[in-house]
Image: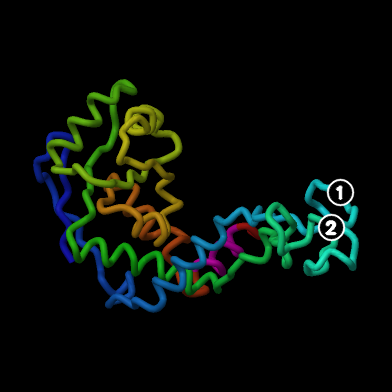
Amino acid sequence: MKTPVYNMKGEQVDTLIIDEQTLGGEINAALVKQAYVRYHANLRQGSARTRGRGEVQGSTRKIYKQKGTGRARMGANRTPIRKGGGHTFAKKKRRQEYHLDMPVKMRRKANRNALLAKLIDNEVVVIDNLSFNSPATKGFTELLSVCSIDRSCLVALRPDNRNARLAARNVDFVTVCAAHELTCFNLLNHRKLMIAKSDLEAWLGGPSSRTDKTFRQRAVAEASS
């Protein structure tokens, strides 16, 4: 797969060849959806709370006597059947109750598969050198204009690319993330992906894109030597 590489003026200056087989070969929709649901569920705070009848404010006195009124018997005003009373089954959720997990290999395959979907739909904008002399938002908006980006865009940057990060953070439809933290969740939540050529090559060859054990074994060997 050939992906065009543009300069800061929006002109194509190079072509990046990416092997589709390293990204899964074909789109596995079920795997991508499972990973997307996992990322989304793990963002939940688990802070939903409702009060039971013993937690709402109010008196425990019986509203009126049991017999002789001709009305139905009634207890305190904090019962669930009365307005302002407590909930019958009060919510006491925790963050751990929403937590989902997936094997590392499946997560990495889903991330690469999401990138493959972006590449097939021509929604990846690769820049040869994504850097700015100053942290000015005007320069970044001009880059978006020449690249014909006017909708939600995910900009993946190196942590040390300070000027580009500061220039992009003020644009409403732009989200900035670290280049090594690309996941299927933030990829699919944005229409476009903008990334530097070197950062994309580093991600494709880094640990985030490895699904076999060779990379881990080599890392362990280098650490032990």
Residue with the mark numbered 1 = 59
- Quadrant location of the C terminus in the rendered image: bottom right
State the residue lying farthest toward the left.
11
Counting from the top left corner in percent of width and height, residue 162 is at 41, 29
**Residue type of the residue flagged with mark 2:** Ala
- Residue at 21% across / 56% down in the picture? 123
Residue 1 is left or right of residue 180, and the answer is: left
Q: Nearer the viewer, residue 10 or 96?
A: 96
Which numbered disc flags the more N-terminal residue, 2 or 1? Answer: 1
Counting from the top left corner in percent of width and height, residue 138 is at 23, 24
- Residue at 34% across / 78% down in the picture? 28
Picture quadrant where residue 15 is located: bottom left
**Is 216 within the magenta?**
yes
Q: Which residues are magenta?
A: 215-222
Task: Give the alpha-carbon distance from disc 2 to disc 1, as whole Å.
Answer: 7 Å
Counting from the top left corner in percent of width and height, residue 69 is at 84, 64
- Residue at 84% across / 55% down in the picture? 63
Q: Is residue 123 above or below residue 159?
A: below
Q: Residue 76 — which label? A: 2
Residue 116 is left or right of residue 158, and the answer is: left
SS for dot 2: loop
Residue 172 is left or right of residue 177, and the answer is: left
Q: Nearer the viewer, residue 44 or 214?
A: 44
